[in-house]
Image (cartoon, helix red, strand yellow):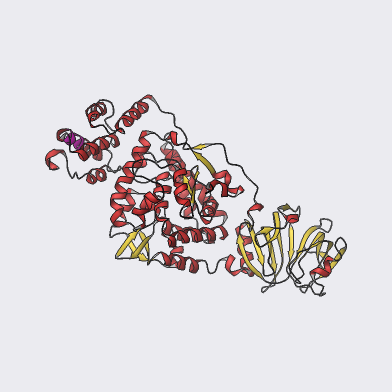
Amino acid sequence: MADTRDRVPPHLRRFVVAQDYGAYTAVDHAVWRFVLLQMYDRLRQTAHPAYARGLSRTGMSVERIPRIDDMDRCLRELGWGAVCVDGFIPPRAFQEFQALGILPIAAEMRRVEHLPYTPAPDIIHEAGGHAPILPDPEYAAFLRRIGEYAVRAFASRRDSELYEAIRRLSVVKEQRDATREQVAEAERALAELVAQPAQSSEAAQLARLYWWTVEYGLVGTPDDYKLYGAGLLSSLAESHFCHDAAVRKLPLTAACVDVDYDITRPQPQLFVARDFAQLGEVLEQACSQFAFRRGGIAGLHVACTAGEVATIELDCGVQITGEVAEVIDDGAQPRLIRLRGACALGRDGQIFPQHGRVAHPQGLIVAFDPVRNGRTAPQLAAGTGARVRIDCASGLSVEGRLEQSLDVGTQGSVVLAEARVLRGEQPVWGPPLQPVSVLVVAGPIRAVRAGAADGDYWPEAEYPQIEAPSRREQAEPQRELQSLYERAALRVAADVPVLHEELQRNHPDEWLLRWNLLELLTGRGLEAPRRGQLVAELWRLEERFEHKNPIAMGLQYLGYRGEGPAANGE
């Protein structure tokens, strides 16, 4: 079975990197194990049944960070695959991967300080959150379909600005040397953007649907539900607090696309799907008025406002790709549009070889009027190379050198080079000495969608020669602590006294390694007095860190409810 990298389209390859498994430290593996042990224990009861089965089926263990190549092999058995990416990638690229049945997995591991919840994509969220539900065929089909629709949905310039602001805040929060001022500035920039009133784009509406389903979805009824959203399945805090009565549980409807969310705070409400089949139903309802469904003038104006590459699909099958710069219509029918940037013509998702990604200096003009003189495209093609004038029903005329007739039947789709669009004898666009390329077409616009119909429209990219996660330089105290973690990972009970004493001497604030030592002794029923010491130290660190770390959760997982042996049945 072919490696998933072999089916990554050329334009998406720039996001795919190699996983440097050796870059994970013993602390990283301890973080994975701490989260997954507790998540698996808790979610066996509260998550969708697919979760418990899905961990092992998708190549994961609670003991160690997974190898993405191993996950890819397992996912290929399910009709999916996995690739490693380096942190944040643009939303549309992420969705296009999912539309192709490829799960992009960020290789980075969250820091201990962000153990309950990370502001940046990491392998706990991407692998431990998204992958386990994929074995469910209805859910997997929905994930691919929402990816397909998100690729076609138009974004706005504000969407891009929000993405950059969120990415910047997440990166700053994960930087160990980031100052409070830098974090505050990134938070301020994001808050200012969010506060600006703006009309919701198609992409923003689908992003909200994705958030309230794929990331934070519940399934069942508001009174009896299971968790399936990746944000819930990968967060110790959210998977616990989502059950609080203060978090409203609402039946999922298409209206959720109008409910905004804040990635920096716990969610005040969650939406409950009846079952995974309903996810597809809601998706269809939410997209029923999108441009790729409506087409026509409305679709053209959405594309023009978005200011991004779009594909216009005509009933005759011709597909025109470029950025819609201007639209002229009569209120009922489109008359002319001007596309700028690199333009391409094609059909059925394939670019015509002679019309692939051409940058027209003055733009590409598309005339939508039916041809009044009645000549068919094949008849016009007989005069290829000659200069012709085509009169249109709108009163406009197009004159230029006949370059090609597109093979779309008799609807008059022809390409003119060195052409002008005239009203009478006056040019409609630009001075008369700046000729343009004109495509003359007839018939209604079936659909207008974001992006290119053919992936070959985009410039090819090679796989970058980089690896993730990035290797981190460590000062001597961190290297010393790493060696203690490495020794603890051997799970030798006889090492616990030495390791504990070293923590007491040199690492008074280190809680995760203390928890690992306590978990080892508790599981084997050893050294009750030392266990009591570790419990007391961990409870003190819980207070010391003002309950910002999941120490109490970890103690409760091991069965400890208070300080010292007496309080815990020793």
Q: What secondary structure is the magenta-colored segment mainly? A: helix
Q: Is residue 50 left or right of residue 188?
A: left
Who is closer to the viewer here, 291 or 25? Answer: 25
Left or right for 501, reference 422: left
Residue 235 x/y as whole percent:
35, 49
What is the number of callouts on the image? 0
Q: Quadrant of residue 252?
A: bottom left
Residue at the right extreme? Answer: 386
Which residue is most to the front? 1
Judging depth in this view, the residue of 129 and 200 nearest the camera is: 129
Point out residue 529 in the picture as x, y percentages from the top left corner.
14, 33
Quadrant including the C terminus: top left
Residue found 41% across the figure and 38% down from its top = 180
Using residue 477 as the reference point, say whether residue 530 is left or right of it. left
The answer to whether 567 is drawn above or below residue 147 in the figure is: above
Q: In this rendering, would 186 be left or right of 297?
A: left
Based on the picture, tell me whether residue 460 belongs to the magenta stretch: no
Image-quadrant location for residue 226: bottom left
Q: Position of residue 244 (x, y in %)?
A: 28, 57
The magenta-colored residue range is 530-536
